[in-house]
Amino acid sequence: MELKKVALNDLHEELGAKMVPFAGYNMPVRYTSDIEEHKTVREGVGVFDVSHMGEFMLRGPKALDLIQRVTSNDASKLFDGKAQYSCLPNKDGGIVDDLLVYRISEQEYLLVVNASNIEKDWNWISSFNTEGVEMENISDSMSLFAVQGPKAEEVCQKLTDVKLSEMGYYTFTMGRIGDVDDVLISATGYTGAGGFELYVMNEDAEEVWEALFEAGAEFDIKPIGLGARDTLRLEKGFCLYGNDIDDTTSPLEAGLGWITKFTKDFTNAEALKAQKEAGVTKRLVGFIMEEKGIPRHDYPIFDAEDNEIGRVTSGSISPMLEKGIGLGYVEKAFSKAGSEIFIGVRKRRLKAVVEKLPLYKD
């Protein structure tokens, strides 16, 4: 199957990005080095082109009812300009996808889903749409830039009249960026470094990108690839769909009980409620390596007696801690912070310690 291209594909290639297939798209994985790009975001400001993400508009008097039916979080708590992290539970105790829900107005919502799950999520939500909610998949017409890092606000503020310092976490507004109107400016972030996401029409993408780099020149702004995005989110313990959560993992096992609200009815709510009452048998934990080594996806996790107690779901070297870090599911008895675990790296057992998230604390 031919790879899809984001609107600025050619620009990334001109910038010297290493392009790789990701979720069906040709995406920039790095421009210089993952470590350099990671530190740019933690200490300054960088821009990710994450236009591969999916966007669905839901409109009509029953839009909220549909969202409440298919998502685990309580979207009735949203107000205009407020966003929410949530997930789509399946009927077997697992997760179809994790997503963001934006309330634009009482009868209009934007759902932002993972690139690899656009068709899957669309079909899943559509299967519950029995009340005539107007659904529109706008994924192919939208570009999305994540401007992240401690200098992100100063850069973006040069381009807009929106008072960015007054925007709370998980809020958004429509505003002007440079000479482009009707940009959705959001403060959700997947790096833990602060910043804003800009949703723009494809035809305005290059103009907004160039405006950002002009405004950020004094702060040494840089384009950032998916490699650094992965290590940044891992340091903060944010889940990646397909690694840390999937169709077989329960939101309760994944530590997402806080987005699983039993104050309403939703897909598979009864089974998840029963799981909560009975208690989960495994949990997703973060850990830091005590011995030199890199934990990788699907490496086994052992206890001190060499019993296998779990699996690594995400792992890398933390550029900020300069140690191996990871996420993984372990038996509940080993999920407390301070628990000693051992990662199976080839035939060796390397010691690690379970840590409370985030793994990197600013």
Image (tube, rainbow, N blue to C red):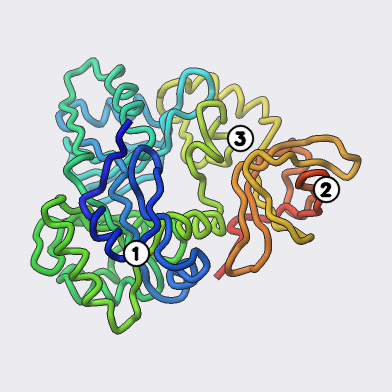
Q: Residues within 10 Å of mark 3 (few under 14, many from 20)?
A: many
Q: Amino acid at mark 2?
A: Arg
In the rendered image, which residue does mark 2 sit on? 349
Q: Earlier in the sequence, mark 3 or mark 2?
A: 3
Dot label at residue 16:
1
Foreground of the two, 183 or 48:
48
Percent of width and height locating residue 61: 16, 28
In the rendered image, which residue does mark 3 sit on? 253
Percent of width and height locating residue 40: 44, 72
Foreground of the two, 99 or 164:
99
Foreground of the two, 21 or 232:
21
Q: Is residue 153 left or right of residue 251?
A: left
Q: Residues within 10 Å of mark 1 (few under 14, many from 20)?
A: few
Q: Secondary structure at mark 3?
A: loop
Q: Amino acid at mark 1?
A: Gly
Q: Amino acid at mark 3?
A: Glu
Mark 3 or 2: the one toward you: 2
Measured in 3D between alpha carbons, the distance from the residue under mark 3 to the one under mark 2, in whole angstroms, is 25 Å
Percent of width and height locating residue 31: 40, 64
